[in-house]
Image (spheres, rainbow, N blue to C red):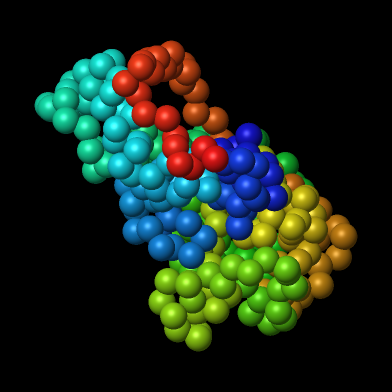
Amino acid sequence: MGGTDNLKTSIGHNWQQGPINSPTVLNSTFNIAQFWDGRAKDLKEQAGGPIGNPKEMASNHDLAVKVISSIPAYVEEFKLAFGSGKVDIDKITTAIAEFEKTLITPNSRFDQWLAGKKEVITLQEKAGYKLFKTSGCVACHDGVAIGASTYQKMGVIKPYKTENNAKGRFSVTGKEADKFVFKVPTLRNIELTYPYFHDGNVSNLTDAVNIMSNIQLGKEFTAEETSKIVAFLKTLTGDQPSFTMPILPPSNNTTPKPDPFGK
């Protein structure tokens, strides 16, 4: 729901637990980069990550190419899309990225309000938007995606307490200053993309708002203030993508099995 699996961390091959909460795929085309640590510069590069991770999909790039190449219907689709039936990982990740670019969620009530439909937002939601701006939330959560355009430290004023081992941008740059610096998540559809934060430790928006106000802004919102901000955040839910699920072409006797990763 909301482009996520709504799990604390995703489950991979052989029920292996993923190391970090999976970000939403919706509106990911607007991200400054992909993954929490920004290690993939775009959707195409990101698409190659899960495919090449045996723990995640019991596969690697070579196996993925062999599987797709063994299925005539896929080869024909690649020929139509790329002008050649030759399948390689570059074409596979390009195809996935092009599909992901279509997964946007326009027409939220907030979008409609910005476009002039003043009646679609309640007084409480407007008050929440005002608090969102005056409290400083908008300093990080801005732009088309209402976030996802910068990297920020998780725990600016106070440390964020978590048992998750993710170090954010530090894992990419090796710079001490980048420890616990993560890509700011989009707030679009935020009511649907629980649980929250990179560790998936927070299950509801009320707690998420209170934690962020405390560790990022050094503020203690009243219950009324928090409820107003949460009300505003719920106006950011847009039209969810709608498409017909395809009937996948069947494998055959020449299609390789996910060995040795299946053991």
State the residue at coordinates (32%, 21%): 254
State the residue at coordinates (81%, 72%): 220
Question: Can residue 234 be seen by looking at this rendering?
Answer: no
The quarter of the rendered structure image containing the C terminus is top right
From the viewer's side, name the closer residue of 83 and 51: 51
Coordinates of residue 210 in the picture (x, y in percent): 78, 64
The quarter of the rendered structure image containing the N terminus is top right
State the residue at coordinates (52%, 38%): 262
Coordinates of residue 55 in the picture (x, y in percent): 53, 48
From the viewer's side, name the closer residue of 9 and 137: 9
- Asked if residue 118 is positioned above or below residue 220 in the image, the reply reads above
State the residue at coordinates (12%, 26%): 83
Coordinates of residue 86 in the picture (x, y in percent): 16, 30
The answer to whether residue 138 is left or right of residue 244 is: right
The answer to whether residue 226 is left or right of residue 118 is: right
Extreme residue toward the right, this view:
223
